[in-house]
Image (tube, rainbow, N blue to C red):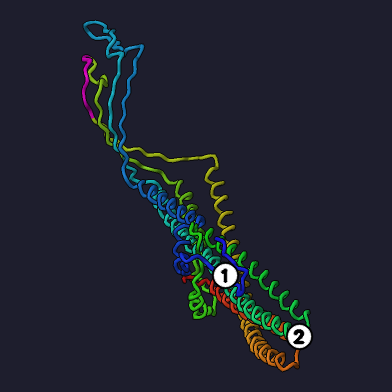
Amino acid sequence: MRFRIAFLMPLAITVPLTAAPLPLSQAQSQLFKNNLDILTAETDVQTAEAGLSQSKSAYLPSLDASASYSYLTQRSRIDVTTPIGAINEAVGFNNNTQLGMDLTYPLFTGFARHYAVAGNRETVAEKRASLDAMKNSASLTLGFVYLQWLLAYREAAVRQTLIEDLDSFAREIADRRKAGVVLQSAVLQAQAQLLAARADLVSDEARIDSLRRTVSTLILSRDSFLTPDSSALIAFDTMQAATALDTSRPEMIAFDHEAAAIRKARDALRYRHFPTVAADLGARYGQPGLNIGIDQFMGWGLVGATLQWNIFDGLKEHWQDAALQQQSYYVDIARARFVEDMTRSFGEAKDRMKSAAERLAACEASLDASVALAGERKNQVADGTATPTDYLTSLADCASARLQVEEAKTAKRMALLQLRFAAGKEIRY
């Protein structure tokens, strides 16, 4: 979107009539729905949930169908000696065809199923906490950009007011020049400052457009006429400042669940030394050769149990456990580093809050003085006790003071937002 600037007096920024303000709450909703980083985190949650379902399926029996055919080049033989003579004959058949159905249920798996399910539950919880942390971080970024976007509009409004004041004074000076009251240099100076203010307004327009594109990228909006909603400032100005760090923040929860998942995985490795027992129930139909005298298809059943106990695995479990131990150590370090970073960030945000409040008070006092001086200078110019240059300077100082007030207010709101994030508070608009 390009804002159209009319270089006629007075100068004005106009936006399309179809432009509708984008409330910050709506922008956050679109952020949660469309942001690619958040969508990636949601996919991680779904993948972890699928892994949990897969591990639970180990408690269900498995049903397998089979079919086989084989041809034996040699048949079974009977070679016995009886009182009536020797028997040496080939029996059985060369062809062997079987169809089967087997139901297998693991009765005992050395607690592998239990710890696999428990570990995957921890992974799901970790991914969900990471998703919440991603939403909070993205909301912080959105809040910062939105505040800068609002600031750009307010700066443009201050610049517009300055242009209107300069335009009015330039007209007045031009009339006084015609009357021979002031020099031509005063007229030229007023026009020069007016043109400079217009150039600054063009820069404001470019910054507004740039921030609009940034917001659109964050929330994946294709609306070319987005504008911020100034009512969002009320939410910031009424937002409560955090006073202490919250240890139950999503990032900490994610670290804790990740560490728990690693512990469950190590437990599962330890219990692999236990034997596994599985029960089997099967049905067959084919030519089993059970009746060696008849080559016919028949049905029969199988019932059994299988005991398996691994004695030596080539130290694979040992090294897997060593790798998991290193992962656990890494998670502990990352958690400690995160706590340290957030503690430092919390302290810095508190300092910025204090500094921003002090700066805002000073800027507001400066603005009051600048407005009073500009009014006095205008009267003095009319009385002939001050020059037009003095009034033009006071107008520029007044606009500068207004800009500083807006910047100080934005800095205070951003510091408040950073303070809540550093404290681990949920950011919702």
Q: Which residue is mark 1?
A: 13
Q: In the structure shown, which secondary structural element does the residue marked by tag 2 occupy?
A: loop
Are the residues flagged by discs 1 and 2 in contact, CB closer than 8 Å?
A: no
In this view, the residue in front, 284 or 352, is 352
Q: Is residue 67 left or right of residue 248?
A: left
Residue 312 in sight:
yes
Residue ranking furthest to the top? 85
Q: Which residue is mark 2?
A: 180
Q: Is residue 372 left or right of residue 281?
A: right
* Part of the protein shown in magenta: 293-300
Q: Is residue 61 left or right of residue 410?
A: left
Q: Position of residue 414 (x, y in %)?
A: 58, 74
Q: Give the total number of marks visible in the rendering.
A: 2
Give the alpha-carbon distance from disc 1 to disc 2, as whole Å.
35 Å
- Indicate which disc, 1 or 2, sits on the residue closer to the N terminus: 1
- The residue at the point 76 percent across, 81 percent down is 186
- The residue at the point 72 percent across, 78 percent down is 190
- Check residue 295 for magenta coloring: yes
